Amino acid sequence: MKMKLILGGAYQGKATWAASAFGLAQTEFGDFPAAGKWGQCHLERFSRACVESGKDPVAEMAILEPMWRSCVLISREIGCGVVPLDAKERLWREAHGRLLRYLAVEAESVVRIFCGLPEVLK
């Protein structure tokens, strides 16, 4: 299986939809980077940790490529709200957006979940 990318806002049903669509049990999900898990969740936490430690999330993701190349990646979309006043928050949102663009190019499919409903982007 080639990597699938699932995006959407908080509490929109991303993991529930992914589990149903790809036949995954809840035990097969873990927070990225979770070794041995088919479903990798919370990429936004990964990108925040990278930015806070002065690292580029795209470069760090490239290092971890064998871990995510054949799994379901799930990420909260954080770039559609009000732009934060805090410079660090803006930096993180920009870095996370670059990470999602990188992964969307690499993904076999990209699906946005809104209110539990899938919108196929790729």
Image (cartoon, rainbow, N blue to C red):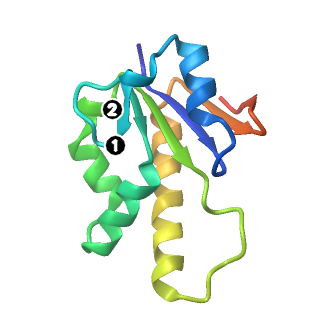
How many numbered marks have been drawn onto this rendered protein structure?
2
Please tell me the numbered disc located at residue 68.
2
> Residue 56, position in %: x, y?
31, 64
**N-terminal of the two: label 1 or label 2?**
1
Displayed quadrant of residue 39: top left
In percent of the image, x 51 and y 10: which residue is there? Answer: 23
- The furthest residue to the front: 27
Q: Mark 1 is on which residue type?
A: Phe
Q: Secondary structure at mark 2?
A: helix
Mark 1 crowdedness (10 Å alpha carbons): few <14, some 14-19, many ≥20: many
Mark 2 crowdedness (10 Å alpha carbons): few <14, some 14-19, many ≥20: many
* Left or right position of 52 against 111: left
Query: In front here: 20 or 109?
Result: 20
In this picture, is 107 found above or below 47?
A: above
In this picture, is 98 found above or below 32?
A: below
The residue identified by callout 1 is 32
In percent of the image, x 39 and y 35: which residue is there? Answer: 40
